[in-house]
Image (cartoon, rainbow, N blue to C red):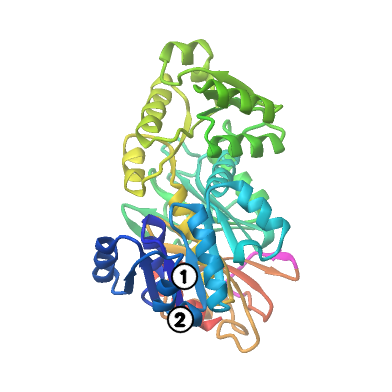
């Protein structure tokens, strides 16, 4: 497949790195030095120039491209880039934007801006935050099969009810599969006798109800209800969208915003939220407003440094769960190493969302885990597929790839996979695959 990527920033680089091994990739960036650097780092063709210009896109062979991805940090540039691409060819165009206004316009008018698929970074990040809030102890949550299936990654603490148990002992939840365990940078495909240890990160795939039951078992006192106290620090677009989505779930978050005009706007547009105009780094204010008693604190300021300070203050005050928005992927590990529960990087979330569209049509959804060690894929199995007609146990033994089938949906009904389950054409299969084997598995479907 021929792919043209406009923008060699963190999002574009991540997408290019995922696609380069299996596709013909051309990257366009306005910075000649960056273009030259990427050419050698990823072994892709790069072109230095304005990605919105027709002559530059022509040089990148956009006219014959299957997919054109415009993912610079500027939404307008990406929209113009897609519009230009549509004048040169009929490739599938993907645009990254931050503003939900562009997203609403695109949703209301099919093909607006010359964009076939639009990814709104801030909204995606907010949706990720809300999913994580809804599952205690979860550090990553993704829906599959139209919401019939959830994938969630949990960090197991010494106090967790499953710590020290074998997988067979811990597997007391209906419609749930222990798909993978990450331990000390190693991916383990769990067996019944595999012991779950403190500090493990377990990947669970199953029905939302079973995933929720597992989460509640791991952290029984942390599931948010209508009385939950959720504090959002920062009325940025991500902070606002997070509060709006929480209101849709009938939760009533509190928001701390220092800018008076922004605080007023938030109060007018979030009727079920309490907006406090103040500096969130003022520890006396935080104590006075009982932020230390909050169930969850989300730090969604526009600066990584300020988010780090607020997150550390919240943990020091005694908040159990702290979620921080981290703009730079390089800082995610730093946040986690100093004890922040969950660090969400909007660029990484965006790159994942875009990357899933670059797999062939059989791959309908994708989630990337643990610094690209593994991926969770949703595949629709067709007639003649190499995965159908055989029991799962036979497939696992015969396919030269490390994978676990976590869930199956058949005729919109969830089927919990077992060793003797036979896959059928039309099945939607959600499976965890070692990243190096993704292309092999996708080609079999």
Residue at 45% of width from left, 81% of height from top? 399
Query: Residue 92 is drawn in which quadrant?
Result: bottom right
Of residues 396 and 307, the one drawn nearer to the viewer in this rendering: 307
Which image quadrant: the C terminus? bottom right
Q: Is residue 24 visible?
A: no
Look at the numbered disc 2 and give the secondary structure of its residue.
Answer: loop
Q: Say left or right for 84 vs 184.
A: right
Boundaries of the magenta span:
412-420
Question: Is 298 placed above or below 440 here?
Answer: above
- Asked whether disc 2 touches disc 1, contact meaning CB atoms under 8 Å apart, the reply is yes
Q: Is residue 194 visible?
A: yes
In 3D space, how far apart are the residues under numbered discs 2 and 1 (Cα atoms)?
9 Å
Query: Residue 189 is drawn in which quadrant?
Result: bottom left
Question: Is 157 placed above or below 289 here?
Answer: below
Q: Is residue 418 magenta?
A: yes
**Residue at which label 1 appears:** 403
Q: Say left or right for 238 vs 185.
A: right
Q: Say left or right for 316 vs 285.
A: left
Look at the numbered disc 1 and give the secondary structure of its residue.
Answer: strand
Image coordinates for residue 288, horizontal then vertical, percent: 50, 10
Question: Is 127 placed above or below 53 here?
Answer: above
**Residue at which label 2 appears:** 399
Image coordinates for residue 70, horizontal then vertical, percent: 48, 63
Q: Is residue 436 magenta?
A: no
The overriding secondary structure of the stretch rendered in magenta is loop
Of residues 325 and 140, the one drawn nearer to the viewer in this rendering: 325
Of residues 160 and 155, the one drawn nearer to the viewer in this rendering: 155
Image coordinates for residue 276, horizontal then vertical, percent: 57, 19
Of residues 132 and 89, the one drawn nearer to the viewer in this rendering: 89
């Amino acid at each position: 497949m021929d792919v043209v990527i406009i923008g060699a920033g963190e999002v574009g680089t991540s997408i290019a790195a995922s696609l380069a091994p299996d596709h013909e990739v051309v990257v366009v960036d306005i910075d000649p030095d960056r273009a030259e650097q990427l050419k050698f780092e990823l072994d892709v063709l790069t072109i230095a120039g304005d990605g919105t210009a027709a002559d530059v896109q022509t040089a990148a062979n956009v006219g014959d491209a299957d997919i054109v991805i415009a993912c610079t940090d500027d939404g307008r540039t990406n929209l113009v880039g897609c519009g230009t691409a549509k004048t040169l060819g009929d490739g599938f165009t993907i645009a990254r934007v931050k503003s939900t206004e562009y997203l609403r316009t695109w949703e209301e008018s099919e093909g607006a801006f010359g964009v076939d698929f639009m990814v709104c970074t801030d909204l995606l990040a907010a949706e990720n935050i809300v999913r994580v809030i809804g599952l205690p102890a979860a550090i990553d949550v993704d829906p599959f099969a139209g919401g019939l299936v959830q994938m969630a990654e949990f960090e197991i603490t010494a106090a967790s009810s499953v710590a020290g148990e074998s997988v067979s002992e811990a597997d007391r939840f209906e419609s749930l599969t222990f798909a993978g365990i990450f331990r000390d940078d190693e991916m383990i495909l769990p067996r019944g006798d595999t012991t779950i240890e403190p500090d493990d990160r377990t990947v669970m795939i199953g029905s939302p109800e079973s995933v929720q039951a597992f989460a509640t078992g791991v952290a029984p006192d942390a599931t948010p209800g209508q009385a939950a106290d959720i504090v959002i620090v920062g009325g940025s677009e991500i902070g606002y969208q997070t509060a709006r989505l929480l209101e849709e779930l009938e939760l009533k978050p509190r928001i701390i915003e220092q800018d008076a005009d922004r605080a007023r706007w938030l109060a007018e547009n979030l009727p079920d939220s309490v907006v406090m105009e103040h500096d969130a780094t003022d520890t006396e204010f935080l104590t006075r407003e009982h932020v230390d008693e909050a169930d969850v604190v989300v730090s969604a300021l526009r600066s990584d440094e300020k988010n780090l300070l607020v997150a550390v203050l919240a943990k020091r005050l005694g908040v159990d769960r702290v979620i921080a928005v981290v703009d730079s992927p390089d800082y995610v590990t730093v946040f986690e190493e100093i004890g922040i529960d969950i660090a969400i990087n909007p660029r990484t979330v965006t790159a994942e969302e875009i990357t899933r569209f670059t797999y062939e049509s059989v791959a309908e959804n994708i989630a990337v885990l643990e610094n690209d060690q593994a991926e969770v894929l949703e595949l629709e199995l067709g007639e003649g597929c190499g995965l159908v007609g055989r029991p799962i146990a036979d497939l696992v033994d015969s396919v030269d790839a490390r994978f676990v089938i976590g869930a199956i949906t058949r005729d919109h009904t969830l089927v919990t996979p077992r060793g003797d389950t036979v896959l059928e054409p039309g099945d939607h299969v959600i499976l965890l695959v070692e990243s190096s084997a993704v292309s092999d598995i996708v080609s079999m479907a």
